[in-house]
Amino acid sequence: MEGFKLIRMFGELFDSVTRRKRFCIALLIAAALCPPALGGQSVTLAWDASSGTSVAAYIVHYGSANGVYTNSLDVGNQLTASIPGLQESATY
């Protein structure tokens, strides 16, 4: 039953082209403003809560190539995420 809530929540989050565009733009801006994690093996991210009433959880997608997000981290309703296992001097 909980799985259906998540699926419905993500469906509602991306139910319009405008919302998808805004989300992608926000993600790209965040990625551009964050310097690469140098010398560390993890990074902590933080964001503001969504104003949408149907958002039940957040999933952070990340990868080492622009537009190719091979990893994901389900953080539930938390507004921070710590991404472990990053390679030194790599850009994500």
Image (cartoon, rainbow, N blue to C red):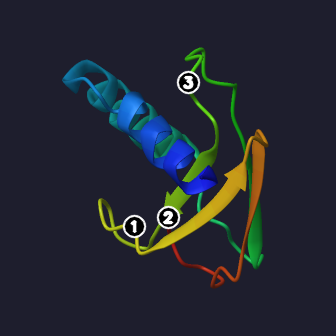
Q: Is residue 57 above or below residue 72?
A: above
* Callout 1 crowding tier (Cα within 10 Å): few <14, some 14–19, many ≥20: few
Identify which amino acid the numbered label 3 is placed on: Ser
Q: What residue does disc 1 label? A: 69
Q: Residue furthest left?
A: 17
Element on which disc 2 rests: strand
Q: Position of residue 88 (x, y in %)?
A: 66, 83
Q: Which residue: 75% across, 54% down?
A: 81
Quarter residue 53 falls in: top right
Is 73 placed left or right of 61 in the picture?
Answer: right
What is the quadrant of residue 57 in the picture?
top right
**Mark on residue 54?**
3
User: Which comes sooner in the sequence, label 2 or label 3?
Assistant: 3
Q: Amino acid at mark 1?
A: Tyr
Q: Determine whether label 1 and label 2 are within 8 Å by CB.
A: yes
Image marks 2 and 3: residues in contact by CB distance under 8 Å: no
